[in-house]
Image (cartoon, rainbow, N blue to C red):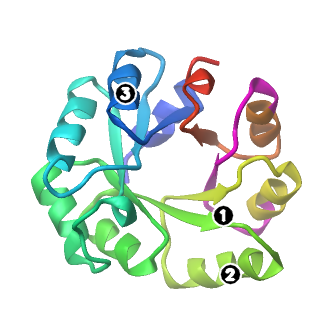
Amino acid sequence: MDQRFYDMVEANPVIAAIKDMDGLEKCCRLQDIKVIFILYGDICNIPEIVRQVRESGKLAIVHVDLIAGLSPKEIAVDFIQKHTKADGIISTKPTMIRRAKELGMYTVMRFFILDSMAFENIEKQLGIVKPDFIEILPGVMPKIIRKVCKKVRIQVIAGGLITDKEDIMAALGAGAISVSSTNQKVWMM
């Protein structure tokens, strides 16, 4: 994997996560936003969504699990790569991450930290597949972010429930490389 993703989040550690057309239009106009997580769409409109993101000079990372009409099988990653030219994917599924890596795409494996079993599952899943980044949700748990960062050798993105500058600073201070948020106010902090 090249340095482009790392360089872009280093330039601005806030990743815009979009869930509708309003978010798409807004984040494409913001010069400071460099990376966009696409959390919506279907097989009919995802090529156009990705095209708009890429034409605005930003990295397009598609949450493949959330695209309506795609199966939870590796062929969905092939579809995203071939028909959208997205830069990468997000998924909770190791098989999807593995296929995207084979295709040379950026990979973000998403983990929901709900309890100690979920926390322990991170290391087990990372033994199966090595994504470029992991995203942990909710991202407002600095103590847990710190533990994850110490436990794994993969860059951590904090996402979910990030609402203000204090949340951003706490996540980054705990070791996250960046934060992702659908909150449009956060994109401009």
> Given this view, does label 1 or label 2 mark the residue nearer the observer?
2
Q: Is residue 148 magenta?
A: no
Mark 2, residues whose alpha carbon is within 10 Å: few (<14), some, or many (≥20)? few
Q: Is residue 153 magenta?
A: yes
Q: Position of residue 133 (x, y in %)?
A: 53, 57
Q: Using the rendered image of the protein, determine whether residue 85 is visible from the camera's viewpoint.
A: no
In the figure, residue 91 lies in which quadrant?
A: bottom left
Taking 90 as reference, is 156 left or right?
Answer: right
Disc 3, SS: helix
Residue 153 is tagged as 1
108 is higher (above) or lower (below) than 178: below
Q: Gap in Å between the C-alphas at discs 2 and 3?
A: 35 Å
Q: Position of residue 166 (x, y in %)?
A: 82, 29
Q: Earlier in the sequence, mark 2 or mark 3?
A: 3
Q: Residue at 62% across / 26% down in the picture?
A: 186
* Residue ID for mark 3: 22
> Which segment is the magenta one?
150-166
Amino acid on which disc 2 is placed:
Asn
Mark 3, residues whose alpha carbon is within 10 Å: few (<14), some, or many (≥20)? few
Amino acid on which disc 1 is placed:
Arg
How many marks do you count on the picture? 3
Q: Position of residue 68 (x, y in %)?
A: 27, 62
* Residue ID for mark 2: 121
Q: Residue at 41% across / 14% down in the picture?
A: 31
Q: Earlier in the sequence, mark 3 or mark 1?
A: 3
